[in-house]
Image: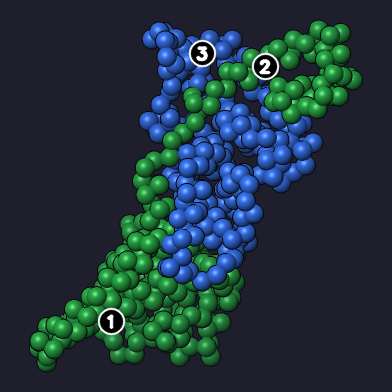
Chain colours: A blue, B green
Amino acid sequence: MAGYPMMAGGVVDLSEGGKAERFKALALPHLDDVYTLARYLLRGASDADDAVQECYLRAFRHFDTFRGGPIKPWLFAILRNVCHAAYAGSARLVFTADGADESQAAPIWREHGDTPEQAMLRRHESETMRRLIGELPAEFREMIVLREINDLSYRDIATVIEAPIGTVMSRLARARGMLREAWIAAEGGGVSR
Amino acid sequence: MNCDEASILMHALIDGELDAGHARELETHIATCAGCAARLREFHELHKMMTPAGLRYTAPASLRVSIEGKLPAPRLAAASRRSVLRGFAVGATASALAASGLLVMVMRGDDERRVLGEVVSAHLRSLQAQHLTDVVSTDQHTVKPWFNGRLDVAPPVAELTAQGFTLLGGRLDYVDAKPVAAIVYRRRVHIINLFCAPAPGSANRSATMESLHGFNVRRWSENGLNLWAVSDINADELMEFGEKFEAALRQ
């Protein structure tokens, strides 16, 4: 059983429709955010599917223990536990940018008034950045996803990763430092197509 | 403030997380340190470049549907009301077709449906009530003997770790008010409960796949046992599990 946390909670009650509706209204709007974190934490799209599903089912079972406030950090913490429990020590926590399913990526936005050239440049930058984030070691990768992509406060990040704020600050500084160097190496190295 | 401190605090400044006192100290340092000033500018640029829209993923629609389908919903309450109505319908049919062969078929179908429901409920309970396993072991030679004296028969236990199904342990459970063995496996983040109920003298029956409340159930009978494998993994994988399990027992 090691690595697979037991689930707490009551017996399923099919009449718990009201609780389910409340949970859905609160938690489902964050599905893309949770999925994004899973995609960066895990290797493949199907692993991310499984982990996100398990995260939501587990979150629902533990919904009674949710103490209000923003639900996103709470969901992230559960997802992170699911990923770590299921894939602890496994190479699957290593992100690889698999170009094959770029179709699953969010459509690259095109700001109003962009020329096709500007849009293409943005798309290229985003693709490079996504790959470089994915290549960071896991503990730094998640800092970038939590802070930059999800705009979580330091306090919320500390909750998610179960670490003091001081750790959040030093880890984020290192994560950005590594990403900056990778970006310079990539763009300086003539990656443009 | 020295450069080491500044190199950490400048990120808090970028993120709007720095208190006024530290912000002033940082600005004083940066005014006199060209290196830190340049780094702050670069990190500002990097931060601005990280436009979330380009870095996000969108969850597949199938994932949303699947999650919604697995949460209890009024829809399910409606479904159970429908089965009550179906019960009435069966009763009416029963009076009309008393003693006909058709009646027996209908009743048996209904009975199996009920047992199927119980098996799925037992699976759900095992995930929810901190009672997944009574005996925790990845070793079949520990799990199998545990059932001695608890059940009339020794349930089959196979190790399938190499095939991607990890044995977690076993548990005594009840289905149709009778004690059954539940052998618990894990596939990635999914749990598979394999329920084995003694059915002395019953004929062997090849596997069928059914689905209830978003769970798949592979049911078969062998050597005087009725078996149900229940999980939320997809039907193909559950079928594969059953086949691997049967193959392992034949070896």
Residue at the location (57% across, 67% down)?
A: A9
A61 lies left or right of B236: right
Q: Nearer the viewer, residue A26 or A139?
A: A26
Amino acid type at circle 1 is: Asp
Q: Position of residue A129 (x, y in %)?
A: 54, 22
In 3D space, how far apart are the residues under numbered discs 2 and 1 (Cα atoms)?
67 Å
Q: Which mark, by number, is residue A191?
A: 3
Report the residue at 59% width, 10% height from top.
Answer: A188
**Mark 2–mark 3 distance (CA, rounded to whole Å):** 22 Å
Question: Residue A141, can we see it?
Answer: no
Tell me: residue A48, above or below residue B214.
above
**Which of the labelled discs sits on residue B36, or is there none?**
none
Of all chains, the one bearing label 1 is B
Query: Position of B84 compared to B142: left or right?
Result: left
Residue holding disc 1:
B111
Three-letter amino acid code at the position of disc 3 = Val
- Between the C-alphas of marks 3 and 1, the distance is 65 Å
Q: Secondary structure at mark 3?
A: loop
Badge 2 crowding class, 10 Å Cα cut-off, few under 14, some 14 to 19, many 20 or more, is some
Task: Please report contact status of discs 2 and 3: CB closer than 8 Å, yes or no.
Answer: no
Given the image, on which type of amino acid does mark 2 rest? Answer: His
Q: Which residue is mark 2?
A: B44
Residue A61 vs B96, above or below: the answer is above
| Front-lying residue, B33 or A139 | B33
Circle nearer the N terminus (2, 1): 2
Q: Residues within 10 Å of mark 1 (few under 14, many from 20)?
A: few
x 40%, y 26%: residue: A107
